[in-house]
Amino acid sequence: MSSRSPATGQRAAVAPLGEPDHPDRRTEIAAGARTVLPAGLAVIPLGLALGVLVVQSGFEWWWATLLAAIVFAGSLEFFLVGLFAAAAPLAQIAVSAVIVNFRHVFYALSFPLHRVTGRGWKAYSTFALTDEAYALTATPAAHGWTRARILTIQAGFHALWILFVTIGAGLGTLIPPQVVGLDFALTALFVVLGVEAYKIRRSLPAPALALGCAIIALLVSPNHMLMIAMGLFVTALVCGYLVTKRRRRVG
């Protein structure tokens, strides 16, 4: 497609619809860095807490760095430390990992993975799809971002997480073992997130349903409370969605 310039009458090339411009890679990396740095401050307390928790659980400090680099899933990492310390069976660890990170399946529906070309880059982007990265990239504007900007955001979170988890592990060697409660850091975080989510949506059914599932799971099996509660909650949400969809069709 082309158009004539009103001043010269010559034909000027027009980019096909749907094809974005290709900005300079350095500019895009800088834009990604500006996006990730403010949000990256949120990983500092959690990273430090995880590092300290790893050391206080009886592991060498380098296990914290290894965990942060290979697993890179904040909530799951806190959970894994407890499972490793308790020498939990591999099957229980695998099932717990699937349940805790199952939300990432839904993240992929709106994450701009199509902008990340190349098998290797796409594989890393899938691996580094965390809650924080999703929050910054699952927007209409992000669907026009370049691969360089998206990967800079994800790699930035990854690097910051490894850094502060390692620092936390170093600090953990200096903290007396009598200091307890560090493993509650993640619970406190999700309590705050839950309160903030309620302030935005002002909806009681979902929190009430989650609380009910937790109580049932606690009564059924305290040792497997998390898996049972999350399984019940996901099942209830799916059933509720199907019922609502059917009612809309009938109506």
Image (cartoon, rainbow, N blue to C red):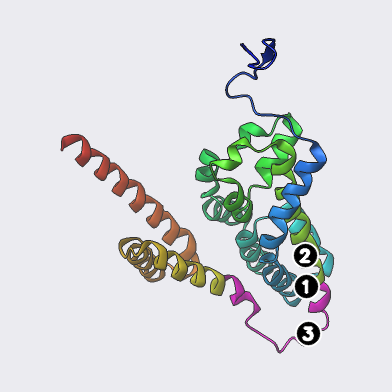
Q: Which residue is mark 3?
A: 175
What amino acid type is highlighted by mark number 3? Ile
At mark 3, the secondary structure is loop
Residue 67: in sight, yes or no? no
x, y (%) of residue 65?
80, 61
Mark 2 and mark 1 residues within 8 Å of each other at the beta carbon: yes
Nearer the observer, 64 or 246: 246
- Comparing labels 1 and 3, the label whose residue is closer to the camera: 1
Q: Quadrant of residue 184?
A: bottom right
Q: Which residue is mark 2?
A: 64
Residue ID at (72%, 48%):
32
Q: Is residue 155 left or right of residue 91?
A: right
Residue ID at (65%, 33%):
115
What amino acid type is highlighted by mark number 1? Gly
The quadrant of the image that shows the N terminus is: top right
Q: Which residue is mark 1?
A: 168
The span picked out in magenta is 168-186
Instruction: Please check the rendered image and state whether residue 239 is part of the magenta-colored stretch, yes or no.
Output: no
